[in-house]
Image: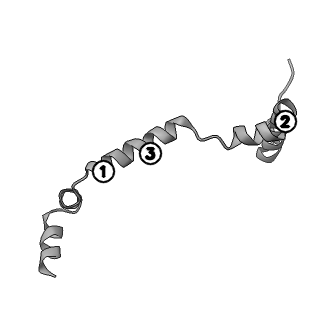
Amino acid sequence: MSSETLMTKERLIRQATDSLIESLGIMEATRFLTLKRQGRLESEERHRAWQGELDKEAFFAEVFGAEQGSKAGEE
């Protein structure tokens, strides 16, 4: 049985990027590393849709309570 030691974070990143570059070439490796993740995009779209339908006054009243609405009306 062989003992395996963990690489430092820096060495792991370096070895992984070197492997990508060797396998894909510098342009495709760079392209791969800068791809947006699909799940993130979906959550951003969902958040924007929620914001588009949001009633700001009702939201603030729910989050900050009824006194917030009355303070805004006093000014």
| Residue at mark 1 to residue at mark 2: CA–CA distance | 42 Å
Q: Which residue is mark 2?
A: 25
Earlier residue among tags 1 and 3: 3
User: Amino acid type of disc 3?
Assistant: Glu
Residue 73 x %, y %: 12, 75
- Circle 3: element type: helix
What residue sits 16% from the left and 82% below the top? 75
Residue 64 x %, y %: 22, 63
- Circle 2: element type: loop
Q: Which residue is mark 3?
A: 44
Q: Are discs 1 and 3 less than 8 Å apart at CB?
A: no
Q: Which mark is residue 21?
A: none
Q: Is residue 4 above or below residue 63?
A: above
What residue sits 17% from the left and 57% below the top? 58
Residue situated in front as seen by the camera: 52 or 71: 52
Earlier residue among tags 1 and 2: 2
User: Amino acid type of disc 1?
Assistant: Gly
Residue 7 x %, y %: 81, 39
Q: Which residue is mark 1?
A: 52
From this viewpoint, which residue is outermost toward the bottom?
A: 75
Mark 1 vs mark 3, foreground winner is 1
Q: Are discs 1 and 2 less than 8 Å apart at CB?
A: no
Query: Dot 1, crowdedness within 10 Å: few (<14), some or many (≥20)?
Result: few
Query: Dot 3, crowdedness within 10 Å: few (<14), some or many (≥20)?
Result: few
For residue 7, side relative to residue 56 (left or right):
right
